[in-house]
Image (tube, rainbow, N blue to C red):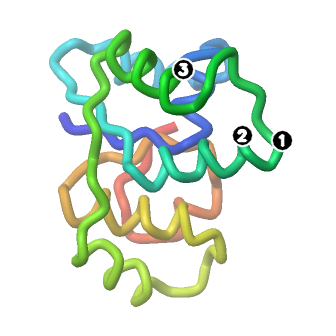
Amino acid sequence: MRLLLDTCTFIWLASEPARISPDAAARIDDAANEMFLSHASVWEICLKHSAGKLNLPDEPERWLSDQLAARGVKELPIEFQSLTASARLPAHHRDPFDRLLVAQAKLHSMKLITPDAWISKYDADVIW
């Protein structure tokens, strides 16, 4: 199974794994599953850090690289099709990062690991 971690799930995986639901944690821990982090989440983490809204033990580039490698999480680039698909989604959620993650999950047939209840309003496979 291919899993797309949303931004807060990835942060919690690295810093507060107890916040992740048992179902999501079981999927993450299953070595048969592939985990991905969107470049949209990378961007969001960098923006939050630079705005003082997210404390990290290191600079975002190093922290992200270390966490991706330590957990075997692959990078998912932002592609043209996902950007255009995100603009066509219904207006259930105004957060452009979350809308892009939904579009990417659908385009790549991934399950989206997120606690965000708004995202479940979209026609996407969500695990939490």
Tell me the SS state at disc 3.
helix
Tell me the SS state at disc 1.
loop
Q: Along the polypeptide, which appears first: circle 1 or circle 3? A: 3
Tell me the SS state at disc 2.
helix
Q: Along the polypeptide, which appears first: circle 2 or circle 3? A: 3
> Mark 2 against mark 3, which lies toward the viewer?
2
Residue type indicated by callout 3? Leu
In percent of the image, x 53 and y 21: which residue is there?
63
Residue 103 on image: x %, y %: 35, 68
> Mark 1 against mark 3, which lies toward the viewer?
1
Residue 19 on image: x %, y %: 68, 21
Residue type indicated by callout 1? Gly
Mark 3 is surrounded, within 10 Å at the Cα level, by few (under 14), some (14 to 19) or many (20 or more) other residues, namely some
Q: Are marks 2 and 3 in contact (CB under 8 Å)?
A: no
Residue sitting nearer the eye, 10 or 45? 45
Disc 3: which residue: 13
Q: Where, quadrant-wise, is the N terminus in this rendering?
A: top left
Mark 1 is surrounded, within 10 Å at the Cα level, by few (under 14), some (14 to 19) or many (20 or more) other residues, namely few
Q: Give me the disc on residue 49.
A: 2
How many labels were placed on the picture? 3
Left or right placement of residue 2 versus residue 122 in this view: left
Mark 2 is surrounded, within 10 Å at the Cα level, by few (under 14), some (14 to 19) or many (20 or more) other residues, namely some
Tell me the CA gap for discs 1 and 3. 20 Å
Residue 50 on image: x %, y %: 73, 45
Residue 34 lies in what quarter of the image?
top left
In percent of the image, x 26 and y 32: which residue is there?
74
Residue type indicated by callout 2? His
Tell me the CA gap for discs 2 and 3. 17 Å
Relative to residue 96, is residue 55 depicted above or below? above
Q: Are marks 1 and 2 in contact (CB under 8 Å)?
A: yes
Q: Give me the disc on residue 1.
A: none
